């Protein structure tokens, strides 16, 4: 527990306060916010960190990030992460960045599946990858509305260092 300034009167209040004891401002209830960290940790991170509610904490103005082995939140960083913006190993999100990424916009070092997918293997509405499958597919091996693009294919080939 730590003290944060009340957004209304500026008095120091607990970051867990539901109501400012000085001016009566409702801190919680104005928005739905839930934060859970499992007591168990691995590599200094909670096994599970779930952060629900807005990405920016209106009481502190700070960005709320879920960080854990399994992370769920507006912004999630984890081995397995799910969120508006998800970064990690296996990621699911509006914007997903990871080894395996699934999302509206998915960027995966390995596999990317999404509206726009960029990855070694990319599947999506717009797919860019070594192996790309999609409505618009650009890659060394591309299956889609578009034909393989030789120049782009050479760049992707060089990026992944393969042939
Ligand atoms: Zn107050």
Image (cartoon, rainbow, N blue to C red):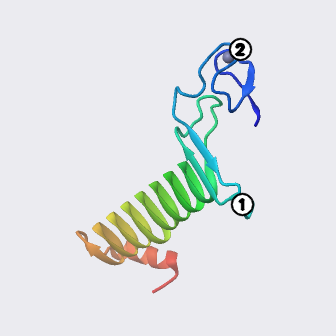
Q: Closer to the camera, 121 or 38? A: 38
Lateral position of residue 8 relative to residue 139, left or right: right
The residue at which mark 2 appears reads as 22
Lateral position of residue 110 relative to residue 79, left or right: left
Q: Earlier in the sequence, mark 1 or mark 2?
A: 2
Residue at x 71%, y 60% (from the top left corner): 41
Label ID, residue 139: none
Residue at x 71%, y 14% (from the top left corner): 22
* SS at badge 1: strand
Label ID, residue 41: 1
Q: Quadrant of the N terminus?
A: top right
Residue 159 image position (x, y, % from top left): 51, 75
Indicate if the residue with disc 2 has its beta carbon within 8 Å of ligand 1: yes
Farthest-out residue, left: 145
Residue at x 66%, y 54% (from the top left corner): 38
Residue at x 57%, y 41% (from the top left corner): 34
* SS at badge 2: loop
Residue 118 image position (x, y, % from top left): 43, 66
Q: Disc 1 versus disc 2: distance between alpha carbons?
A: 37 Å
Q: Quadrant of ligand 1?
A: top right
Alpha-carbon neighbours of circle 1 within 10 Å: few (<14), some, or many (≥20)? few
Relative to 52, is 77 above or below?
below
Residue 70 image position (x, y, % from top left): 59, 60
Lateral position of residue 118 relative to residue 70, left or right: left
Corner quadrant of residue 138: bottom left
Alpha-carbon neighbours of circle 2 within 10 Å: few (<14), some, or many (≥20)? few
């Amino acid at each position: 527990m730590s003290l944060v300034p009340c957004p209304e009167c500026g008095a120091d209040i607990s970051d867990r306060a539901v109501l400012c004891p000085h001016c009566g401002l409702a801190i919680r209830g104005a928005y739905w916010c839930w934060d859970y960290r499992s007591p168990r940790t691995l590599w200094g991170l909670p096994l599970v960190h779930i952060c629900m509610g807005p990405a920016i904490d209106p009481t502190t103005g700070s960005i709320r990030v879920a960080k854990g082995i399994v992370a769920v939140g507006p912004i999630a960083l984890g081995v397995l992460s799910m969120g508006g913006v998800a970064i990690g190993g296996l990621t699911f999100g509006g914007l997903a960045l990871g080894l395996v990424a699934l999302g509206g916009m998915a960027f995966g070092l390995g596999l990317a599946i999404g509206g726009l997918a960029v990855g070694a293997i990319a599947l999506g509405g717009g797919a860019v990858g070594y192996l790309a499958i999609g409505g618009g597919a650009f890659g060394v091996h591309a299956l889609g509305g578009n034909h393989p693009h030789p120049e782009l294919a050479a760049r992707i080939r060089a990026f992944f260092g393969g042939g």
